[in-house]
Image: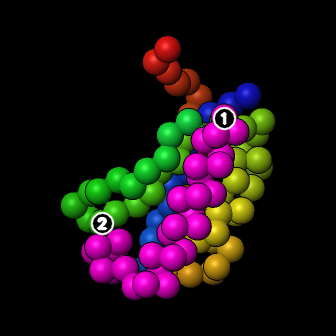
Amino acid sequence: MAYFLLRLEPPPPPSFPFDATEVEKALFSAHSGYWMEQAAAGTAIAVGPVFESGGTWGLAMVEADDAARAEALGEADPVLMAQAGFRYTVSPVPSLILRR
């Protein structure tokens, strides 16, 4: 197994999710549920929002057989399936120190 960082980029504006619409809030509820299932299954190691000065993005650290499987995890996320302007970038993490 290998580790991958999935970075979820939201569409503009940079103030997202603070000014999210009701539709976006519902979509992110489905997104959260999806990643909770992945965490319960042991696939997702850590998932959450990252607040940077330039805007918010989402982090998912996953364990997968290969990059294609990691990309498939992102593609199955409800926010991507809704074609709402979000996208994932997938980066390999060649070494990871985990707490016990």
x, y percentage for residue 80?
63, 71
Q: Is residue 93 above or below residue 37?
A: above
**At label 2, which amino acid type do we have?**
Gly
Coloration of the structure image: rainbow
Task: Determine crowd level at label 2: few under 14, some 14-19, many 20+ residues with C-alpha closer than 10 A.
Answer: some
Is 24 covered by the magenta stretch?
yes
Dot 1 amino acid type: Gly
**Is 93 placed above or below 31 here?**
above
Q: CA distance from mark 1 to mark 2?
A: 29 Å
Identify the magenta region: 13-42
Residue 10, x across and y down, in percent: 45, 71
Q: Is residue 96 magenta?
A: no
For the question of whether residue 21 can be seen, the reply is yes
Say which residue appears at 47% left-offset and 79% top-offset: 24
Check disc 1 and report the residue beneath it. 42
Which x, y percent locates residue 58? 45, 57
Q: Which residue is mark 2?
A: 55
Q: Position of residue 75 (x, y in %)?
A: 70, 63
